[in-house]
Image: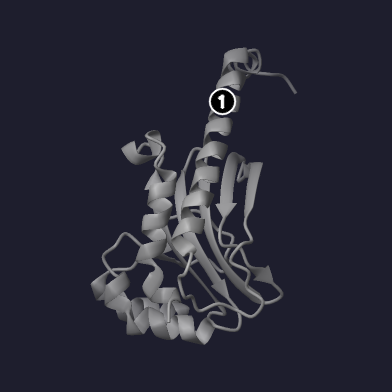
Amino acid sequence: MLFTDDETALLADAQFFRKKAAITTKIRAMLEATHGALRNDLKGLSLVVPPDFDLNLHQLVKGEHLEDFPYQYLDCPKHFSGANTFTFRTLVWWGHHVTYAILLEGSEMGRYKRQLFGRFHQLAGRDLEVSLAPSLWEWKRGEGYTLPITHDRKAQIAAVVAERSFLKVLRCVPLEDPRVREGQLARMACETFRLMHPLVTP
C-alpha cells in the first residue's frame, strides 16, 4: 500500500485543505440563506401534506461520502415520519451538481399523482425531471436515472410512476453555472419550489 506521487503531493498540499474548508463554509452560509428564503416563501402557502406535517422543521447536513464525494444539503420543509415523506432538498454534491428535489411518499401519493398528470403541462418544459431510480436516495441524473418532464412525455412518465409508492421530482444545475458561482442557491431554490407548486398545492 504505497502512495503515488500524485497522492503524496495532494496529501501534503495544505492549501488544498484550506480551500476545501473555505468552500464548505461558504456552502453552509448559502444553505442557511436558502433556509431563510424558503421559510419566507412558505408562509401562508397552502400545501397538500401528510398528517403531523410541521412546516418549521428543517435540517442542514454535511458529509464526505456520497459515492466518495463530499456533499452538503438543506431539507426545508422536512417531513420524514413513518411511511410519509414531504421534503424539499437542496443538495450540493461536490464533483457533480446542485440538485433541488421534492421527495413525496405515503398517504397523499394518490393526490400527488393525480395533480402531476392533471396539471402536467404546468410542470412540463421547466427543467424539471422525474427520478427513475428505485428509491428516493439516488442523486445521479441523466439517461437511466432521470426523465425530463416535457410536453411530449406524459404517457411515458405515467408508465414510470403508475405503480410507485413514492415520487421524486428534481431540477439539476451544473456547478459551473454562473448562478452557482455567484451564490444564488437561495434564489434558485425558491424559483424551483414555485415551479413545483402545481404538484403539491390544492
Residue 139 image position (x, y, % from top left):
52, 55
Q: Residue furthest front?
A: 44
Tell me, yes or no, if residue 187 can be seen here: yes
Q: Residue furthest right?
A: 1
Tell me, yes or no, if residue 142 can be seen here: no
Q: Residue at x 53, y 57 (%)?
A: 89
Q: Residue at x 53, y 79 (%)?
A: 164
Q: How many labels sit on residues?
A: 1
Where disc 1 sits, the SS reads: helix
Residue 143 image position (x, y, % from top left):
39, 59
Q: Nearer the viewer, residue 9 or 124?
A: 124
The quadrant of the picture occupied by the C terminus is bottom left
Q: Nearer the viewer, residue 143 or 35?
A: 35
Q: Is residue 78 left or right of residue 168?
A: right
Question: Which residue lies under the disc numbered 1?
Answer: 22
Q: Is residue 19 above or below residue 180?
A: above
- Rendered image coloring scheme: one colour
**Other-residue count near label 1 (Cα within 10 Å), few / some / many at <14 / 14–19 / ≥20:** few
Q: Nearer the viewer, residue 48 or 112?
A: 48
Q: Residue at x 62, y 73 (%)?
A: 53
The quadrant of the picture occupied by the N terminus is top right
Give the amino acid type for the residue marked by disc 1 in the picture.
Answer: Ala
Q: Residue at x 26, y 65 (%)?
A: 125
Q: Is residue 114 left or right of residue 167?
A: left
Residue 67 image position (x, y, % from top left):
60, 46
Quadrant of residue 50 within the rendered picture: bottom right
Q: Is residue 175 above or below residue 40?
A: above
Residue 119 image position (x, y, % from top left):
32, 80
Q: Is residue 93 above or below residue 200?
A: above
Quadrant of residue 126 within the rendered picture: bottom left
Q: Is residue 36 above or below residue 45?
A: above
